[in-house]
Image: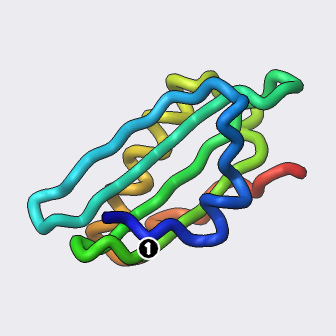
Amino acid sequence: MRVRGNVFWEWADPALHHRTHDETLDDGTHIDVQVRLSSTGQTQMFIGVYAPQGMAVHEEAFDSRPGESMTRAMAWGVGMARKIAVEGKPAVKPKAAAG
């Protein structure tokens, strides 16, 4: 069972349509990447990496992914989540979230 942190709960909005990628890696680490369109049409993303026991290792939310479709943001986010899971930290500095 995942234990969601504050980043997820502050980002979550069940009223907005979203797409989700859930994956469990060979070592039991779980990644959860979600993308959605905001009410103003901006692509937004959440990246969560959780230990096999369910505790959050890393959670990050992006209020805007300028110039990215939901599909492109999802692909980038899944790659980033996998790197974080393997390396323990982001491999590259993510684009700054716009508020």
Residue found 44% across the figure and 70% down from its top: 3
Along the viewing direction, whichever of 90 and 41 lies nearer the viewer: 41
Residue 89 visible, this orientation: yes
Estimate the x, y position of residue 21 in percent, counting from the top left.
38, 38
Q: Secondary structure at mark 1?
A: strand
Residue sitting at x 45%, y 35%:
20
Residue 49 image-quadrant placement: bottom left
In front here: 92 or 88? Answer: 88
Quadrant where the N terminus lies?
bottom left
Indicate left or right for 47 with 21 as reference. Answer: right
Q: How many numbered marks have been drawn onto this rendered protein structure?
A: 1
The amino acid pointed to by label 1 is Ala
Q: Provide residue 7's location: percent of width, then percent of height.
A: 65, 65
Q: Which residue is mark 1?
A: 56
Q: Where is residue 60 shown, x and y percent of the image?
A: 60, 62
Residue 16 falls left or right of residue 76: right
Most foreground residue, 4 or 81: 4
Left or right: where 71 falls relative to 38: left
Q: Is residue 64 above or below residue 53?
A: above
Residue drawn where x is 77% and y is 53% of the image: 97
Residue 67 visible, this orientation = no
- Res. 38 image quadrant: top right
Seen from the viewer's position, the closer of residues 22 and 42 is 22
Does 65 appear above or below 27? above
Q: Is residue 59 above or below residue 40?
A: below
